[in-house]
Image: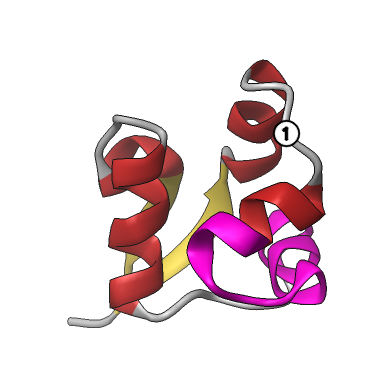
């Protein structure tokens, strides 16, 4: 079984919290381009980054990232 990230709510959550991509990137210790790539689905974050984003938004990884089993 392999898990595949099929979508995420990072952009939606970032906008609700009135953060720029740069502000979120600074909080996560990554580049703005990384946040942009995650938001548009070009990049699947590492597990530590996915957990960090979920914790930052006081949510769960399952809520922030939609995962399908293959």
The stretch drawn in magenta includes residue 47: no
Residue 39 in the image: state x and y as whole percent. 72, 55
Q: Position of residue 60 (x, y in %)?
A: 25, 39
- Against 32, residue 55 (above or below) is above
Is 39 contained in the magenta span?
yes
- Name the main secondary structure of what is drawn in magenta: helix
Res 67 visible: yes
Q: Nearer the viewer, residue 67 or 37?
A: 37
Residue 61, horizontal then vertical, whole percent:
29, 48
Number of residues whose C-alpha sits closer than 10 Å to that of mark 1, classed few (under 14), some (14–19) or many (20 or more): few
Residue 16 position in % (x across, y down): 65, 17
Determine which quarter of the picture holds residue 69: bottom left
Task: Write down the residue under mark 1.
Answer: 19
Left or right: residue 5 compared with residue 52: right
The color scheme shown is secondary structure
Above or below residue 18? Residue 6 is below
**Position above or below: 23 against 31:** above
Q: Quadrant of the N terminus?
A: bottom left
Residue 4 image-quadrant placement: bottom left
In the picture, measured across the screen, residue 21 lies left or right of residue 29, that is right
For the point 66% across and 62% down, which residue is it?
A: 25
Residue at 78% x, 59% y is 40
Q: How many marks?
A: 1
Given residues 70 and 51, the one toward you in this image is: 51
Quadrant where the C terminus is found in the figure: bottom left
Classify mark 1: helix, strand or loop. loop
Q: Is residue 70 visible?
A: no
| Residue sitting at the far top | 16
Residue at (62, 22) in percent of width and height: 17
State which region is magenta: 26-41
State the residue at coordinates (28%, 59%): 51
């Amino acid at each position: 079984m392999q898990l595949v990230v099929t979508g995420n709510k990072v952009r939606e959550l970032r906008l609700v919290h009135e953060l720029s991509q740069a502000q979120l990137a600074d909080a996560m210790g990554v580049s703005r381009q990384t946040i942009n790539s995650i938001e548009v689905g070009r990049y699947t974050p590492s597990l530590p980054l996915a957990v960090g984003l979920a914790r930052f938004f006081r949510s769960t990884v399952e809520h922030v990232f939609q995962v399908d089993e293959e």
